[in-house]
Structure formats: C-alpha cells, structure tokens
Amino acid sequence: MSESTTRAAAPPYRPGTSDAEIEAAAARAERRHRLAVRSWQVLLLAALLGGWELLARAKIIDTFFFSSPSAIAARLYEWITQGANGAPLWYHVWVTLEEALLGFFSGFVLGILAGVALGRNRMASEVLTIYIKVFNSVPRVVLAPIFILIFGLGLTSKVALSFVMVFFIVFANAFQGVREADRSLIANARILGASKWQLTRSVIVPSAMSWIFASLHVSFGFAIVGAIVGEFVGARHGVGVLIQVAGGAFDTAGMYAAIVIIMVVALAAEYAVTFLEKRLAKWRPEALQEAPP
Amino acid sequence: MPGTHDASTPAIELVHASRRFVTPDGKSMTAIRDFDMSVQDGEFVAVVGPTGCGKSTTLNLITGLDRPSGGEVRLFGRPVAGIDARIGFVFQTDALFPWRSVIDNVVAGPLFRGRPKAEAYAAARRWLARVNLAGHEAKYPHQLSGGMRKRVSLAQTFINEPRILLMDEPFSALDVQTRVLMHDALLALWSEVRASVVFVTHDLEEAITLADRVYVLTAGPATVKSVYRIDLARPRIAAEIRYQRDFIEISHTIWNDLRDEVMKGAARSDAPA
C-alpha cells in the first residue's frame, strides 16, 4: 500500500504520452498516410498517361493501334458536344444503361427468388442440380445471336442477355447463402414461434444477404457485359455500337473513348452498390482501427 | 393445455426414451437409451454429464425439434407433437439475430406469434429493463459484451412467458465472474415466472447452485445414473453459496459419482476411431 502512494506522486505516463496526445498523433499519422496514398495514386496516373502521350508523340508506339490520351480526350469532347453516330452521346449511354439495369434487376430479383426457393426445398434442389450445372456450363455470350433472332434488334434481346448473365450468379449465391444459414438461429426462430414463411423471411433471407451482396458487385459488371455484347451482335444505339462502328472505321481513339465511358459507368455502379450495401448491412461490425505502434 | 392439468402431473416426463442417429458414414449410433426423467411444474432441474454424452439430444426431444426412436416424451401429461408454444430455449451458442437490434430481437417471439406490434414492443421494453438493458434497445448484438448478449437471449426467451424453460449450457462461453452474475439474474427471473427448467451443463457447481435436483448422466449412450436433491435454501446467492459447507459436501458426493463417467467418456474420445 505504502509503495503505491509513493508511486502515485510520479506522473503515471512518460511525458508526451497522455491520451489526448496519443489520439492527436494517431489522427495526424492517419491523415499523413491518406495524403501519401492519394499523392502516389495521382502521380502514377500522371506518369502512365504522360508516358503514353509522350511515347505516342515520339512515334515509339503506333497511334494506329494505341491512339493517345489527347486523341481520346478530343474524341470524347467531340462526342459530348456533337453527338456520336447520329445521336447524342448521352442517348447511347442511356440505351446501354437501360439494357444493363433492366437485365440486372430482373436477374437479381428472380435469382434471389429461385435461389431461396430451391435452397429451402431439398428434394427440388437435388433433382434440379444437374440441369442447373448443364445450363451454367454454357458460356452466356453464345446466346447473344439467338436472343437477337428471337427478340429482334431492340431493347429486349440485350435485356435477355444481361438477365441470364446476372441470374445465375445471384442464384448460385442466394442458394449457397440459404444453405449456410446458422442452424441454431433457425432452431431459435422455430422455438420462438416462427412459421415456415416467417422463418424464410426473417432468418433465412437476411442471413443469405451477405452472400447475395457479394454477388451484387460482380453481377452488375456482367449486366454491362451482356448489354454490350448484345449491341455488338446487332443494335442501332448504345456504347457497344460506338465501339463496333469505331472499330469498323479503324478509329482507335473512338474505341478507347467508348471504353472510358464504360469504365465511368461501371465505377459509378460499383459505388452505388457499395453505398446500398452499407445502408442495408449496418448491423455488421466495422473493422476496428489498429492502434499505432 | 396450460391450466387444465392438475398439479400432480409432471411438466416434463421422459419415459424409457431413446434416440438413435444414423451417422454421415451410415452407422447407427445411440445417443440416449432408456432415459427416465420427470420435472414437476415450477421445478428447476439440472442435468450434468460428460461431454458429448447426449445431453443436448435430450433437450431436442423435449422441444419437439427431434423425435424419440423409442419410449415417450410428455409435456403436462400429453405426448410431444411438434414444437410446443409453451417452451422457451436458451442456446449455448449465440442465437441472437445479428441483423436485428436488441429490441427487435426480443420482440421476435411475440411478433412471430401474432401479438399486436405496439403491445409486443411495450413488453420487450419491460423485459429489457428487467435484465438491466434499458437504454441498449437500439444497439446491435455485435456491439454488446457476451454477458449482455446472454441477457438479451434471456429477455427474448422470457417474453414468451414459457411454462417450460430449456437451457443448453447457456453460460459456458462466459468468463467465471460474468457467469456468476448470470446465475443470479436467471434465479431472479425464474423465481418470478416459476417455469419448469431443465438446465444442461457440464459444470457441476453451476448445477448445484441453480437446481432443485441434479441428474447425473452416464457417458454415452446417456441414461440417468443417479438423481440428487439439492436442499439448499432459496433465495440463493450464486457468488456466495459455493463457499457454504453443505454446498461443498454435496458437490463432493456428486463429483465422486460423476468422475467415473467423465473418465469413461474421456477414455472413449481418446481411443483411436
């Protein structure tokens, strides 16, 4: 006891290590770290684009195949101000986006419904597994000509292609998620009085949700692939058509410009999905921040 | 039906109950054999036995999640048919719904059973206050400590006002100090609602602290080896009762009995398969 009183007179920590000081130091280190990462990212981008431009101007790489950042930017500017291929640029983007979104949502909803229904029904799932495997083994893009034949050059054929691309991914994940649902959670809900439908709705589907969200990130990409491949095969408008036409005219700047547009759309969609996921899965623990050494 | 039985009918009765499983490699395995147990209305019974001896199977037979291969399981004199609404179950693992807030977890049972929303939430708030969790309603399970999560589980179970309460090693994952606090919380709740309890545990002291009677099981296949009446006065204080002389004596007697089975169970699980 006497020992602890004599010790209490001395400061409990080394100077400069109070809680407030440690917190401030951690915040400062964190800010510095983020700034460093951002600067390197910008620097790398500048180096890549600058290097590309320089090599193109110095005729070390062939602009016929690889174009140059300035030519691509010029083509993008031209498309934005004057339209492309006889229609405004935003219209092409909208057409592709509409196809991808419709395919994505229909595939997503039906994929979840089918996955959950089959996951809950053991007999049906065992009977159908082999057929699902067979269908799943077909590369989806080979269906594009068939869909164009059946549904014509318009919207429907691309939506159908997007749909089959998205459906199987979401289906497989929803099915797996249902199968992985925690047994004691199910038992708990049943004893608390849940009917079969209540069990599906309030235990099975929420616990499959993390699997379903994992599929969401991949599947929007596939929805865009479906729309664009469909446009390659036959369409009047859309970003896929821009690439096709530019390619036919040996306009590499145009092809790269279209790819840039797709990149922007896909990135925006990825952010939207992440945002949605964060809103819906707020019950999940956030990763703890590591204390500085 | 609740209320229609006379007082002498046991709340839970297992008569020559047995349960056999077919293991994944196609072998038949007997989990419990010729099991007799009877729990009076409002009685607290603890079941101890070596690990993996079929204690959980016994509980599953009472809930109706599982059916006996032989013999009979009765609740208030009637054979078990499906999941009985009068049963509450507290699990060993964390069985709270992680995507639901604390209050939405507690309210699950009443809502599943079709009680009006406002009434269910009012009841949930009352039960959370009773387990000292007022003010934590909006939190999610991952934001709580292990002891708090268990108290949410208790509220979630007690809100259904079970006549029969089954507990499968509910506190085994908690540290010793928290466990003692949970014992007191459980005894307080139980003294109010007077449900019949079957409390499965491998912790003999826990069993003696809580129960009116302790069933000692044999190493699997489980049957009842012996039954001890615990004549310690109630209300009991979990933190102190274990230092009483008669507690230590009882504990010693039962341990002498249980030890042989624990040895047998350990020898079996060590043996090459």
Image: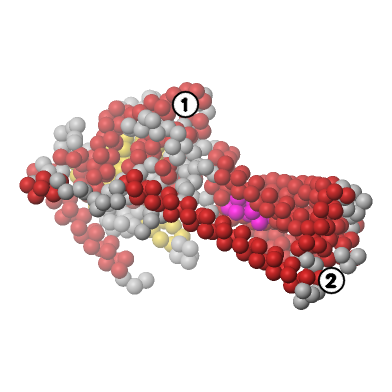
| Residue type marked 1 | Ala
Mark in the foreground, 2 or 1: 2
B41 shown above or below B17: above
* In the displayed structure image, the side of residue B246 where residue B125 appears, left or right: right
Magenta segment: A211-219
Residue A114 in view here: no
Looking at the rendered structure, which numbered label has been put on residue B120? 1
| Residue type marked 2 | Phe
Query: Extreme bottom residue here?
Result: A60
Indicate yes or no whether the magenta region holds residue B126.
Answer: no
- Residue visible at 70% across and 60% down in the picture: A132
Percent from the top left, x then y, of residue A265?
73, 52
Judging by the rendered image, the residue that carries numbered circle 2 is A64
Labels 2, 1: one chain: no
* In the displayed structure image, the side of residue B214 where residue A174 appears, left or right: right
A39 shown above or below B135: below
Magenta-drawn stretch, dominant element (helix, strand or loop): helix
B273 shown above or below B242: below
Q: Pointer 1 indicates a residue of which chain?
A: B
Q: Which sits in the foreground, A148 or A245? A: A245
B14 shown above or below A124: above
